[in-house]
Image (cartoon, helix red, strand yellow):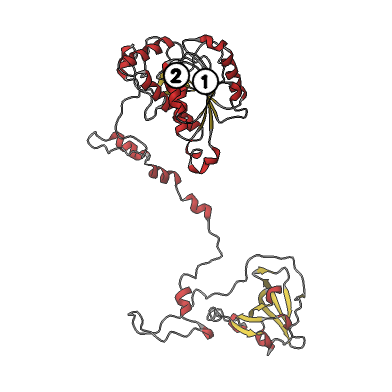
Amino acid sequence: MATDWLGSVVSINCGLTLGVYQGQVSSVDHASQTISLRQPYHNGVRCPVPEVTFSAMDIKELKFLDIQNTVDKPSSVQGAASEPSSVPSGRQGQSNKITHPHVTSSSSHTSTAPITILRRAPTAPANIRGATQATPKKNSVRNGGAAGPMRPKDDECFGDGTEEDLDTDFDFEGNLALFDKAAVFSQIDGTNSHSNRAQHHSTPGEQKPVSYRHDENILEGKPVIYRQIAVPQHVGKEYCTDSGLVVPSVSYELHKRILAAAERWGLSLERRLETIGVCSSQMALTLLGGPNRLNPKNVHQRPTVVLLCGPHIQGAQGISCGRHLANHEVEVILFLPNFLKMQESVTSEVNLYSRTSSKQVANVKDLPTSPVDLVINCLDCHENRLLREQSWYKLAADWANQNRAPVLSIDPSVSEQHQMVEAKWTLFLGLPLPLPKAESRVYLCDIGIPKLVFQEVGIRYHSPFGCKFVIPLHSA
């Protein structure tokens, strides 16, 4: 009886520990309750030994993948055992003891290919199933089909297209060589040389419209003129904006003429102070962090700004800036020395600043000893250069340099001498003055002077500000 199963291809499940073995039955010993497989595969990998012997107590499940009788008849039975038949492990033995399968011989031959299950011969009809042929469905008329025997369920799924040799590797390099990437990408980009030559040799009436990208302008524009401001006298220093427009610097004498002409046409000192205060405070708010710093959730860390102002128009500009900063919930400390007589513009700005309930000091000792967020320097005066020699000026400049806070200078006086206060940013009004060295980053403020006012003093002017009131300038 045991000899009937010799030559059959079986699958033996030995549990999670030993795994699954496949191979051809070589011997069955009823006395010792063992079964041997030749050319075995362990979990789909070829075993390094030609034969493996199993004990009945190790076998959990045994399936017949092919029977020996069908192997001898390849012309008619290749599909006879497509559906494996199972044999319970109880027919092999009753013991539950697990023993590792022992090897009868050794070999150095290894392989990584899984065991090859016999397929149907190419000459065999697709509907020949053999002994284990599936039963046709009873309902032969379905979905409007004609009556008659239906194809077995395995043929419906696996019957067609399985005759090819699946062991042949796919030739990736050969198929990749058939793909002309250059031609495809040139067609996608619209830069095919054939289409370009066709457009070049076509008549004007037959030329196709040029395709534009989403970031190209379809309207032909005039060439950009970057030098749109011309001054009557060059002082040797030029700046340029982020867009490349050239902004020349002017001397202080020409700057005074511009302001005087603007006052004659109605741009009074009070209006100019208000405009400068708004623009400079907007720049200061941006330097302090903008909306990331100034919001209701950060009430506990309000920024602190110290204003260093002198008794002159530049000091009045700084006080106007401090008033607007205080209105935006910035903690402002104004330093202004006590003078018996100050200009009327300074007095009016101080009175208005006092309504903000912000702090005002007249002694450097009352200024904070710890670093603040920003220092605004308005100590310099264009008209009086001797202020630098006074003690209050030197003390205030020394405090600003030692506080380690960044400094913003508004409309500083320009001379060959070194600046007493080292500024990180410098804000000029209308047109820049020639800063001797690139000591700080230069910004320009629009104070509302009309174009014809510039023309009145001999300056050809086109606004470089665009959509902003304060713009950065770079050394040309």
Question: Does the CB distance between marks 2 and 1 fall below 8 Å?
Answer: yes
Residue with the mark numbered 2: 346
Residue 216 x %, y %: 35, 36
Label 2: few (<14), some (14–19) or many (≥20) C-alpha neighbours in 10 Å: many
Question: Quadrant of the image for the N terminus?
Answer: bottom right
* Label 2 vs 1, first from the N-terminus: 1
Q: Residue at x 49, y 83 (%)?
A: 134
Label 1: few (<14), some (14–19) or many (≥20) C-alpha neighbours in 10 Å: many
Residue 443 visible in the snapshot: no
Is 150 situated above or below 439? below
Side of 393 where 227 appears, left or right: left
Residue 128 x %, y %: 48, 81
Residue with the mark numbered 1: 336
Is 289 situated above or below 60? above
Closer to us: 348 or 454: 348
Residue 271 visible in the snapshot: yes
Side of 375 where 213 appears, left or right: left
Label 2: element kind: helix
Distance from disc 2 to disc 1, alpha carbons, whole Å, reads 10 Å
User: Of all residues shown, which one is farthest toward the bottom?
Assistant: 1
Residue 289 x %, y %: 51, 35
Q: Residue at x 57, y 12 (%)?
A: 390
Is 317 situated above or below 44? above
